[in-house]
Image: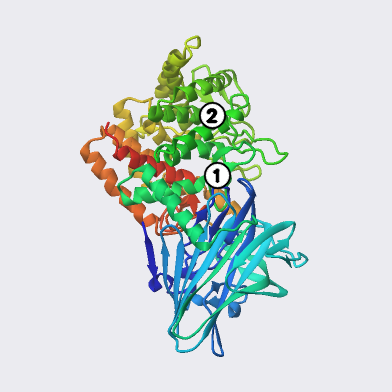
Amino acid sequence: MKFIYGKQDWKTFERGQENCFLMTNGLGGFSSLTMTGSCARNDHGVLMACLHSPNHRYNMIHRLEEVLCLGESRIHISSQDFTDPKDREEGYLYQAGFFYEDYPQWSYLVRGVEVVRTIGLMQGTNTVGISYQIRNCSGRDVELEVKPHLQFVPKGALLSEEQKFVVEDGMISSNGKNLHFQTNGEFRELPLTYYDNLYYAYDECDGRRETGATAVNHSVSLKVPAGEEAALEMVYGVSAELPSMEEILCDVRQHRKLLKEQAGFQEETAAQLAASAYQFISYRSSTAKQTILAGFPFFEDWGRDTMIAMVGCCLSTRQYSTAESILQTFMTYCRKGLMPNLFPEGKEAPRYNTVDAALLFIIAVYEYYERTQDAVLVKSAYQTMAEIIDWYVKGTDFGIKMDEDGLIMAGQDYDQVTWMDVRVGDILPTPRHGKPVEVNAYWYNALCIMDEFKKFHLEDERDYAWMAQQARESFGRKFWNEEAGCLKDLVSGNKADLQIRCNQIWAVALPFSVLSPEKERQVVEVVFRKLYTPYGLRTLDPADEEFHPSYGGPQLQRDLAYHQGTVWMFPLGGYYLAYLKVNGYSPEARTCVARQLEYISAALREGCIGQLPEVYDGANPVSSKGCFAQAWSVGEILRVYDALRTEV
């Protein structure tokens, strides 16, 4: 899918900063700028290298300052905002187009000179290539001068003026880090200059640090005589062996082509999402296996997010070996029946504060087996899965334990262990201690799955079928809200129990039905009526007194709204799968879902181009917020596209 934007998309400087691109390298590194080439966030960068995969990221080259010299005129074609509006670079005024398919390209027209900028990020290395195709019809000689603005600091950190930069033998060194370079242009070493006045509009609106600093110590330039064409190329990388620009672009095109071919989707939006899904896959150094990063630019690889995202991002795209690697990674770190919520980094221990990741692991193994019939993986995971069940029955950390009624309770003190896990000091904006609805739907499914998997371990004497039946009977008795015609969000004895939330949709969407068909249909109808939007499900009924209509501002304000009405995209996948299920996957139901999925094509053009975001406002979801690219949003929508092409 090729995305094409024109001058109407950056009528103002501010409009031009609304959308960005993302390229990732499979190591945790990435490249991301706005469609006008500016940095609107601290986390934007031409080269965000990952020096220890997947989370030790360094913003090496933050932005590019580009000046076209025509006679006595020096015209910026780069765009960037600064704390003093008088310093603003307004290259967007000369920008004719922005294009994104496999990599981003910008075109500029300046007094008879056409410049096309291309950036490519190579897979498996921290290497970025930048090229400028210059066609000079101005009638006089021109020169393009490019100044890379450097940082060499951890992602989100602030460059200090005490930090030194050294250029020697094709390498820039600073802060203990090295960056090699090669170019066909004229390289000039410059006196080190610091800029501490960068302004980031999209950090300020979220209450983050809205200013930044960079350093410039060199420029690269190319002169183009009147009437001629020429190309300026620059390649920067952490490794000394650097490819050519053409090799980088070839690598990107081939990589994305293979991803789309392997996924096999005929629908254009689905094929685009298949390529976008792989942007979240990363190598993890600590396990020497694959993992899934929850979202860009903020998040790391989390257990819950990985288990949800993996089904769509890997299985629906037929990346089965990647899925196996991820499952093996998590098996390694299972402890007391729990899967890590956050992996260890350096000397830090894993964090296990999640009730659902382990149950989702069992469901993910089942989904993997359904597609691959890989009994070897199931057998190797069986003991881990059985231990998960045992620990949940007898009790493990964070108040996780099976109650006498066969249902799972979780949460204690200030520990938030479901996906609605915000805690602000001693404030729990969405308290869910007790028996969460989706957790018990996962529990029932895990028990049903283990009963099926017993054929691989006949000596296992656990009676999973009896436990599942007990859980199902208790679930129907305790979670059904007859007055509302849907499921309670929680069984705790508090008012939160009766809040209408999106979590109930997974009780319908999962492989094994914990409700009767009629009650499943009622749940789907209530969720559509009260929570559905084209870009996700609201986390709370707008009629609820605790509903927050918008998400933004300082962190406290954002946290109080995060699960209190904010629209999340990933539950939309569960809704569509549930709708197809209760309607028997009929042609009419498939047509309805396919029509509603057309909204996703519009979402791909906004925010991070070609990607799906984390959240939108609850009242009027028109602009993406939070992480501009979210793994489980992409994965869950891919599951729906996969279901639409599958015969039932």
Residue 529 pos. (x, y %): 33, 43
Residues 156 and 207: in front is 156
Identity of the residue drawn at 33% across and 30% down:
520
Left or right, residue 530 beside residue 183: left
Residue type at the position of mark 2 = Ala
Residues 544 and 368: in front is 368
Identity of the residue drawn at 55% across and 44% down:
282
Residue type at the position of mark 1 = Ser
Number of on-image labels: 2
Q: Quadrant of the N terminus?
A: bottom left
Residue 182 pos. (x, y %): 61, 65
Residue 43: name its quadrant. Answer: bottom right
Is 240 drawn above or below residue 382 in the view shown? Answer: below
Identity of the residue drawn at 55% across and 39% down:
290
Q: Quadrant of the C terminus?
A: top left
Crowding at dot 1, Cα within 10 Å, few <14 / some 14-19 / many 20+, comes out as many
Left or right, residue 156 beside residue 134: right
Judging by the rendered image, the residue that carries numbered circle 1 is 282
Find numbered disc 1 in the image and state the secondary structure of the residue it sits on: strand
Answer with mark 2 or mark 1, whichever residue precedes in sequence.
1
Residue 462 pos. (x, y %): 50, 12
Residue 93 pos. (x, y %): 46, 78
Is 119 drawn above or below residue 510 in the view shown? Answer: below
Judging by the rendered image, the residue that carries numbered circle 2 is 358
Find numbered disc 2 in the image and state the secondary structure of the residue it sits on: helix
Q: Rounded to the nearest whole Å, what is the CA distance between mark 2 and mark 1? A: 21 Å
